[in-house]
Amino acid sequence: MFAADDEDRLPLLPRARRLGRSGLYEAATITVAAAALAVSVFPAQAQFASLTAFGDSYADTGAAPGGAFRILGTVLDIPGVYPCVAPLASCRFTGSTNFNDTLQSLSGLPGLTNYAIGGARTDNSNTIGLLGTDFGFPYQLQQLALNGTRFGERDLVTLSIGGNDESYMTSSDTLATVNARATLAAHNAVYGGIAVDGFVTGGVQQLVAAGARNIAWLGSGNSKYFPQPEPVGVALTTAQRDAWAATYLYETQVALRPLAQAGIRIFMLDFGILQARVAADPGRYGFSGTQCEAGPIGEGVPLNVAGCFYENSVHPTGAAMAVIGAYMANQIDAPTTVMPQGSIATGVAATFVDSVFGRLDAYRTFQNYGVGSAIAETFAGTNAMATTTPVAVAPQSRWSVFVDASYPSGSTDREFYAAGADWQAVGGTLGVEVRLDPRVRLGAVLGYSEPEVDLDVQNTRNHIQAYQIAGYGSFTDVNWFADALFAYGRQDFSLDRSGVIDVVHGSTSAETLAVAAKGGYLVDVGPVRAGPIAGIAYTRAVIDAYTETGDSLLTMRVDQQSLDTLTGSAGLQVRVPVLLSSGLYSPFLNVTAEHDFLGSGRTLTTTQVTTPLLPVLTPVPEDDRTYGKVAVGVAAVLTGNVSANVTAATTFARDGGNDIMVSGGIKVAF
């Protein structure tokens, strides 16, 4: 951000007292406390492999290939200016840490690469006069090109640039001139076109050409909130400052928009909003509200830097930078909290389908056909007729009603761009069934469940109320069987995730359609019946668009989502006849290989409320498309016309996590 033009123009320098050991201890204490708070809200995640910083003094960590103090070779030893008692390669303009240090910590990265240089402007000049006109943002891009650096999808690039360009303004500038200056700065930052030693730099577009796909940009804010707002020692009007801030923010978004629409994920923090909040209520963010420095101070004048948002005339303290970094980290991680919704919606629908099919499998024994010779031989051991023809079991009533309860649960591992999740649900179904003849039955089912999904990012929780209805048909013959189902569902989502100072909320609804069928052919194999089974299930989920509520610096607008799955299964069913005093039972075991033919990969679109021109397009990674599944179950007569069933199922060998479901119910025939 703003830095000095030269030592002879002292009014233009950031006027900060040099911190002694006591002052540094106070600043470090509050910085550590703020960072600890941020870590508790945003646990360190290995989402990114590297962090590379560009820009001005807000981003400058002092290290090569950037670092204003490192390039100068000295700390500007002027009373009250540039607090730095560390090695030059570690000197920051905050006197402590900056937002890049916070992002590095929250991302769990061992280090970062710093190209940023304090005082940098977008046109390659620098407000620190001793650095001349050769150490602006274009110089950093030229160094990037010389180093041959390439970025990948897992590399995070950060940027803070443009604020120092405001120092070109004069009190005589009209608002039209101010807007033109701000627009030029925005174009310089994004498009470049400035030559450095014969190399024509390309602004942010050059970073993208080098492979950058994730860019976190700290907006320049509004200079009217600075303790010493005059960037060039002249009194600019509030209208001029407001015009610069608004125009630069808007024009930067306009220039970046084509990149965002092409899939470059750009997260821009509107620093001006945060400045305004702190000015109105510093205690809201844990600052004391003590009047911070607003101009030159004499040696020995006490200043409670640790309680201030600003460390000097224009630079935030380390504690303030920890808050800024926490906001930026939250913005970056926010889309990952939306990512699981599609899989949740289709998963709830699939669980409902599985519960219906599992119940049909459990009750398949109680048909007048499809028992087979293995079960007939079981009867033969009790003086029943041994035959390979269908054995008549106890006749059933034509109509029946049933009620089931289910408890599915599961987990998914964290992936790049996707939060890990643990989920569980308590639900139930109520249905009616009619037997058209001994082989055919039709039914209708109503289902309700309340899935709870906890994500490992930002303490995110999804509470869902799911309503489903299905119609099904089942056919069972001597050797083969077939089931088919059509289901519709509605799911109401209530969403909560941690912000920086409050909780961000969201709510939306999803509709699902499911069409599924399964069948098998069973033959006698000694004392059991066994044979191949296969199935196919198509599910479509559409989740309505919604806008989060809460802290506007963090809230997102989430576009409509849709997801289609087509899962095929093939495997083996084994049934073992068991004869008890109450009757004949045939527990089943299904072992199948499952394959999703469509995959779950797609693109999620979110947009920060404060930067409406920059949609964030996040690729959703595909779930494991091939895995195994085991299901078991049995039904039994309790008394008279009352029977019960119990089923259980689990996936296995699925990369990223497995699901399990247990269900049971009662059926009454009449």
Image (cartoon, grey):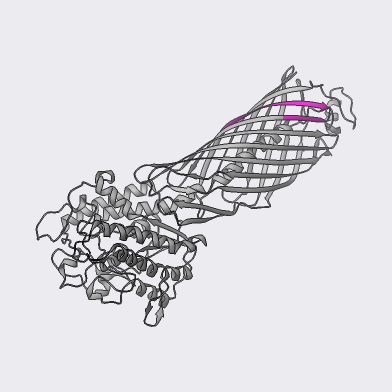
- Residue 613: x and y in percent read 45, 56
Magenta stretch contains residue 553: no
Q: Quadrant of residue 521?
A: top right
Q: Is residue 607 left or right of residue 248?
A: right
Tell which of 36 and 211 is nearer to you: 211
* Residue 222 visible in the shown view: no
- Residue 112: x and y in percent read 37, 64
Q: Residue at x 82, y 39 (%)?
A: 522
Q: Is residue 108 left or right of residue 558?
A: left
Magenta stretch contains residue 428: yes
Q: Which residues are magenta?
A: 426-443
- Residue 468: x and y in percent read 63, 34
Q: Residue furthest top?
A: 640
Q: Residue at x 30, y 55 (%)?
A: 321
Q: Determine whether 384 is above or below 159 in the image.
A: above
* Residue 633 visible in the shown view: yes
Q: Residue at x 36, y 68 (%)?
A: 184
- Residue 262: x and y in percent read 52, 62
Q: Is residue 419 left or right of residue 125?
A: right
Q: Quadrant of residue 670?
A: top right
Magenta span main SS: strand
Q: Residue furthest bottom?
A: 198
Tell which of 390 and 98 is nearer to you: 98
